[in-house]
Image (cartoon, rainbow, N blue to C red):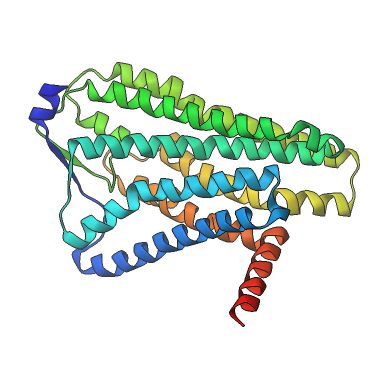
Amino acid sequence: MRENQSSVSEFLLLGLPIRPEQQGLFFALFLGMYLTTVLGNLLIILLIRLDSRLHTPMYFFLSHLALTDVSFSSVTVPKMLVNMHTQDQSILYAGCVTQMYFFIFFGCIDNLLLGVMAYDRYVAICHPLHYTTIMRENLCISLVAGSWLFSCSSAMSHTLSLVRLSFCADNTIPHFFCDLAALLKLSCSDTSINELVIFTVGALGIIIPLVGILVSYVRIGISILRVPSAKGICKALSTCGSHLSVVFLFYGTIMVLYIFPSSNNSNDKDIIASVMYTVVTPMLNPFIYSLRNRDMKGALGRLLRRDTLFSK
């Protein structure tokens, strides 16, 4: 590792494939999107914290998802904005490894929380009479704590397997953040261990929650079809619509990026997909959950009315 750090002290992030004259426009655009992400998700956390009607398992998980979205976006976007503003593309070796660790960490938590929320919706729709008994406080805390611990272990395993590698003279990363796949391409060492970690630990962080989501919604669909009614379908859509929208948005971009990757000669599609799930998805989540959720809109209305009364 000492030889590695002495030979490569920093990397160069090429950033987004945009022309120099468009830098100012895209800087303002991404700054606005990042601020919207932070303020929107913090508003969700605040509403859930202040409104006792939202102290339920679903909103407990949603508050952690909102916190994760803020953190996930903050890992990459501020550095990208600084690079665009200063035209300095360099990032220290230690900073690059740290960014990669937290990117994997919060990305994995996002995956697992979506799976946990799908299980919560399954219990709410298929076992409504036993919901409070099954989704007790201890189970909810254990599911969230388990997601954080697994994500920490997953990110650490990727990081430890990376720092043992040595890097060649080429230190240019054709991306706007320190992507693990891009770093492995720059290495002069044997990356078979890293690939093994990706296909085992890394894949589990995606496959486990994805299977959980699919199984949960298949069971929900079967439950609705057993007693088909307009009221039941409307209730299921209102309960699961927001979560399904986020799932399709998040996993859709991951599939484009990792399951159907572009050729080695064309990197633009990968960067656009990365922008989707690191910038766009965390920004849209507050709008999806607030606009499609009567409880969140009601909590926001009560908060605004209370502030209006205090201001008089």
Question: The N terminus lies in which quarter of the figure?
Answer: top left
Name the spot of residue 306 as percent of width and height, x first.
Answer: 65, 71
Rendered location of residue 287, percent (x, y): 57, 61
Numbered disc total: 0
In this rendering, position of residue 10 left or right of residue 112: left
At x 28% / y 48%, what residue is drawn?
A: 176
Query: Does any portion of residue 20 appear in the rendered image?
Result: yes
Q: Nearer the viewer, residue 312 or 250?
A: 312
Q: Is residue 242 above or below residue 181?
A: below
The image quadrant where one finds the C terminus is: bottom right
* Residue drawn at the location 35% of the way across and 25% of the way down: 158
Q: Who's the residue at 80% across and 37% down the image?
A: 131
Give the farthest residue toward the bottom: 312
Q: Is residue 278 above or below residue 222?
A: below
Can residue 168 be seen from the camera position used here?
no
Q: Is residue 309 left or right of residue 251?
A: right
Of 169 and 8, the residue lying toward us: 8
User: Relative to 169, is 276 above or below?
Assistant: below
Horizontal and vertical percent position of residue 264: 28, 38
Report which quarter residue 47 is drawn in: bottom right
- Across and down, in percent, residue 244 comes to 64, 47
Q: Residue at x 39, y 29 (%)?
A: 155
Identify which residue, 146 or 239, lies in the foreground. Answer: 146
